[in-house]
Amino acid sequence: MRIFLLTIVILLGGCQSMPPLPSWQSPEGLQHPDLGLIIDLQQGEPMSARQLVDELADADQVLVGERHDNPDHHALQVWLLQALAQRRHQGSLLLEMLNPDQKQPVELVKTSVSRGHWPADLPAELQWQEGWPWVLYQPLVEYALVQPYPLLPANLDRDEIADIYRRVPALKGRAGGTEVQDRLLEQIRDSHCGMLPEAQLPAMLAVQQQRDRRMAEQLEVAPTPAMLLAGAFHVRRDLGVPLHLANHERDAKTKVLMLAEVGETLQAKQADYVLFTPARPQQDHCAAFGKQRNWR
């Protein structure tokens, strides 16, 4: 009889329904054949949303890469947290968007919310930074604030960044290798439209990599299972946070999911899984960047 009851419990757990996937919000690529496709990059095979959740549920550390201005990526992050919560308890959530000096304000707000008191001006109480559009991150942050697990900072403070600019620290291991650093320098040049003075690039590279190192350090001490939400380059296996983890070699305890817009191409060395979403309208950031430089 006990074996029969145990079998029923296991079957019921396996049949547990997942939360529905969110509706798309971004306008571009809605007819693209890859829209909504999830691929296991290591196997080169498509997978279902349930299979993705099953895979991530077994990991101690889940790194999710986003495009910061894509609302579909933020909606999927909430969905993923909800879906994983049906499989196992979440240990912690870490955000690139939070700095160490926000840790106490976040904890105070979380305590207040747990008692049923929401601040009248939530972003102000969290000391939320203007560089991260609140309208995009609000649903995610509000969801995290009512959960029993901690919401943790994963970035550097401004003073720490200033120190890195003044004295560029050396990196050892693969993260400090020429191949990794040359690729990151290329990305920094491209993201600034080739308009940065070459003399400024080493410091900017150092800040990028020290951010990766900080995220790795925070992940390693965070309650598990831990999830990190950060920009796509930060979570890449071949360039970002995974290179700074103590167990940086690929293993089952760390999984990388990339949220990518349709039309993007990802390789197995970059992530374990990719989920394709609609895209934001293309903007000529370089034209705007050039105008800003001319205005200055």
Image (cartoon, grey):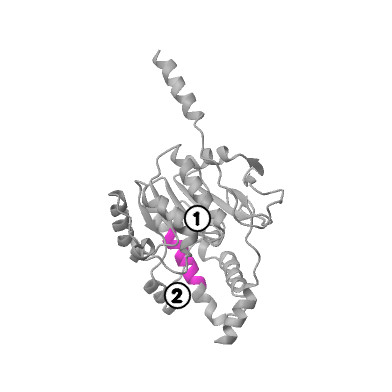
Identify which residue is drawn at 44% across, 62% down.
97
Residue at the extreme top of the image, as rendered: 1
- Looking at the rendered structure, the secondary structure element under dot 2 is loop
Is residue 80 among the parts visible in the rendering? yes
Question: Where are the magenta residues, as a range?
Answer: 205-215
Q: Categorize mark 2 by other alpha carbons within 10 Å: few (<14), some (14-19), many (20+).
A: some
Residue 87 image offset from top left, x and y in percent:
45, 37
Query: Is residue 187 shown above or below 259?
Result: below
Is residue 236 among the parts visible in the rendering? no
Residue 97 lies in the magenta stretch: no
166 to the left or right of 255: left
Residue 206 lies in the magenta stretch: yes
Labels 2 and 1 touching (C-beta < 8 A): no
Sequence-wise first label, 2 or 1? 2
Q: Amino acid at mark 2?
A: Val
Q: Amino acid at mark 1?
A: Pro
Residue 185 image offset from top left, x and y in percent:
58, 71
Per the image, the residue denoted by label 1 is 242
